[in-house]
Image (spheres, grey):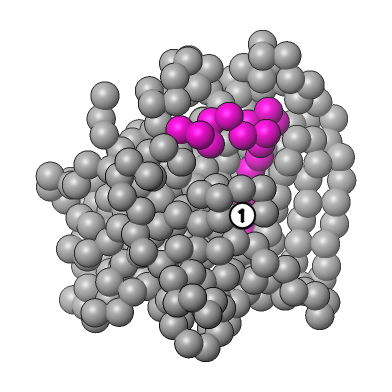
Amino acid sequence: MSHPLAPPKDPSLLLRFERRFGLGPASDPRERLRRLARAFAHLPYENLTKIIKLSSTGSPALARRPPAEVIEDHERFGAGGTCFSLTAALLHLVRAAGFRAEPLLADRRYGPDTHCAIRVEIDGRPHLLDPGYLLDRPVELPRQSPLAVAGAGQGLSLEPLPDGRRVELASYAGGARRVRMIFKIEPADEAQFLRAWDESFFWEAMRYPVVTAVRGGRHLYLQGNRLQERDRGGTRRREIGPDEIASRIARDFGISPAVATRALSALRSAGERHG
């Protein structure tokens, strides 16, 4: 079993990824990192592959998808992963590019250590990379003042908390502020990260399909049979019939219908209504 956080032994997976996305040579390492992050943002957030892997292995430890599997599944099926597998994959690529990087954990409204991201050092300063929340570039972690960022098709702000150890990610829409998550600035050790990853296999959200991505200036979000589309013109929501889910995932997110069909079948076998 390949260890998902194992340091890269060579740059082969990084070079394969860069070829896949047509990323040419960059003389500036920081520019290489920016290109890498932008390209990686093409991988959708999706729990379909996670549902399939858990169903086939029966064990969270065996169901963790290592970086090479994440990249291969994207090449073959247009798949991505949830925050843990996406973070592990991008972490591998960033380290292979020569950067010092570590995983971070974050708390969300439904519990501690329920999200993750990457802390990468750029010119001696810590930056945040969050492939699971559709942030497509490294952003410096603020220590004193809030920092406005753009991501997931909405206005976001990173806001340091008074304890100096945590940073809130807040969204602003229509004058309303909503805390999306709270990042812990100190890196998580391997045991903490893997424990949080394994616990994620038993979340409520594993009982139905969840897929989100930014496509053509639109932020698309599927939860169960509800599809939401947000752009500058506003937000539109609709319900999808059970027979449409796999085809809509393929059409809107570019994921092979075979992947969606297999995940829905696994849910159905487990007695879930969205299978």
- Residue 132 location, x and y as percent? 51, 53
In the depicted structure, whether residue 247 falls above or below residue 31: above
Answer with left or right where residue 5 lies relative to residue 181.
left
In the depicted structure, whether residue 182 falls above or below residue 226: below
Q: Quadrant of residue 195?
A: top left
- Residue 121 location, x and y as percent? 28, 71
Residue 35 visible in the shown view: no
Q: Residue at x 78, y 45 (%)?
A: 227
| Amino acid at pointer 1 | Arg
Q: Quadrant of residue 5?
A: top left
- Residue 65 location, x and y as percent? 39, 33
Q: Residue furthest front?
A: 163
Number of dots carrying numbers: 1
Magenta highlight on residue 102: no
Answer with left or right where residue 172 lies relative to residue 139.
right
Q: Residues within 10 Å of mark 1 (few under 14, many from 20)?
A: some
Viewer-closest of 47 and 16: 47
Q: What residue is shown with label 1?
A: 108
Residue 271 visible in the shown view: yes
In the depicted structure, whether residue 220 falls above or below residue 169: above
Viewer-closest of 120 and 135: 120
Q: Residue at x 18, y 76 (%)?
A: 27
Answer with left or right where residue 194 lies relative to residue 258.
left
Q: Residue at x 12, y 47 (%)?
A: 10
Q: Residue furthest bottom?
A: 145
Q: Residue at x 66, y 14 (%)?
A: 270
Q: Which residues are magenta?
A: 198-215
Which secondary structure lies at badge 1? strand
Quarter occupied by the N terminus: top left
